[in-house]
Image: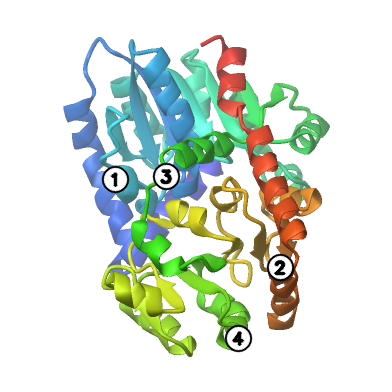
Amino acid sequence: MYTLGIYIYILCVKVAALFGHKKARRKLAGHKETSAILKEKVKKGESYVWFHVSSRGGFEQARPMIERMRATHPEYRIALTFFSPSGYEMAKNYQQADVVCFLPFDTCRNVRKFLDVLQPRMAFFVKCEFWLNFLTALKRRSVPAYSVSSVFRREPLLLLRIAARRMRKALHCFERLYVQDAESKRFLEKIGVFNAAVAGNTRFDRVVKVLEQARQLPLLEQFACGKPVFVAGASEKDDEAVYMPFFNKNRDCKLIVVPNDVSDEHVMAVEKAYSGACVRYTRASVEEAQAAGCMIIDSYGLLSSVYGYGTVAYVGGGFGKGVHNLLEAAVYGVPLIFGPNNGRSLAAQRLKEHGGAVEVRDAQGFDESMALLLADDEYRARAGAAAERFVLESAGATARIFEDIGL
């Protein structure tokens, strides 16, 4: 039944591609490239460690492990596979991996061909990536597989019990499941999986490294002019409807907007929503930046550095599908604000518990929270310190995993 479901999924992707779905087309094109990439890049006689991630977020969680493996075990080559086209496009030129390609669809034939070529010594599946045929084949070949930074909650486990008993078999294929928290370990034990260990989230290790490598952005210093700066990161239209009214009424705080989508249409919508002088980062002179009240970062790749210029940070997505990455803002020691759709983010829950973040549900709630953070320096400093402490104290998952494996 599982393999039949995979074939149905492949058919759906092909149908979607026929009707012009861009991601489906890119996925199919990427899968066609995989065999050629493996043939070109995989060197016979070399030992490979295989990392599989779903998308961009999983890649950021894998990076600390890949880079540590590269530094401490140069005898291994690194293979990195993706499920998501967007993740693959971002990382296909990643220099720390020797082979980067799409994960073949999880059919028995594809699995056999892939493993016969790569012949990995060990495999790491990041977060909740459980491909039954791949995992079964790895176990049959005595290749240790590890789940990294995975999270388990009641809802998916009910599905495991009722509708996907075969998927529970996948969990038993892992040599070890390195879960993010004790709650996940307890849930696994309830369904008879006892090979789990609490290691934490490798994403914390990544943001600490990013902090060390943060870029200096002199134009943002000129823009601030000594005033408080509010950074709205990964901002979406629903977020802007919540925070923009405050800045249209209050000019004592500078506003930096980093849109999640930097298309010209979205950037123009932000410019229209802000009632004062607004400039784009890629086009502004120093004089224009100093005179403006709002700056829009109209290019990708700067967000993690931009947060370092903030007095208060807002992380978008909480009024949409779900709040985006909170850790890359929290590591700078700034208090955070985000919307109500954050239940699936462990970081959001912990930041609220530690006093490093505030959840707002509407524009009025935002106004009240922002006014308090700007008026009370001691409260703001305490919240920022709590956010930073949470990140730094949570780091170290990579080292714990490597020590447990014996690497």
State the CA–CA distance, disc 4 to disc 1. Answer: 46 Å
State the SS at label 4: helix
Binning the other alpha carbons within 10 Å of mark 4 as few (below 14), some (14 to 19) or many (20 upward) gives some
How many residues crowd around disc 1 within 10 Å: few (fewer than 14), some, or many (20 or more)?
some
- Position of 390 with respect to 44 (left or right) is right
Q: Mark 1 points at which residue?
A: 31
**Which mark identifies residue 214?**
3
Report how far apart the C-alphas of labels 3 and 1 lie in the structure. Answer: 35 Å
Residue at 44% across, 34% down: 63
Q: Identify the residue under disc 2.
A: 340
Q: Distance between the residues labelled 2 and 1?
A: 37 Å
Q: Mark 4 points at which residue?
A: 245
Q: Earlier in the sequence, mark 2 or mark 1?
A: 1
- The alpha-carbon separation of the residues under discs 2 and 3 comes to 29 Å
Q: Which residue is drawn at 30% across and 39% down?
A: 101
Q: Earlier in the sequence, mark 3 or mark 4?
A: 3
Please, what is the three-letter code of the amino acid marked with disc 2? Pro
Q: Which residue lies furthest to the front in this view?
A: 226
Which residue occupies 36% across, 66% down?
16
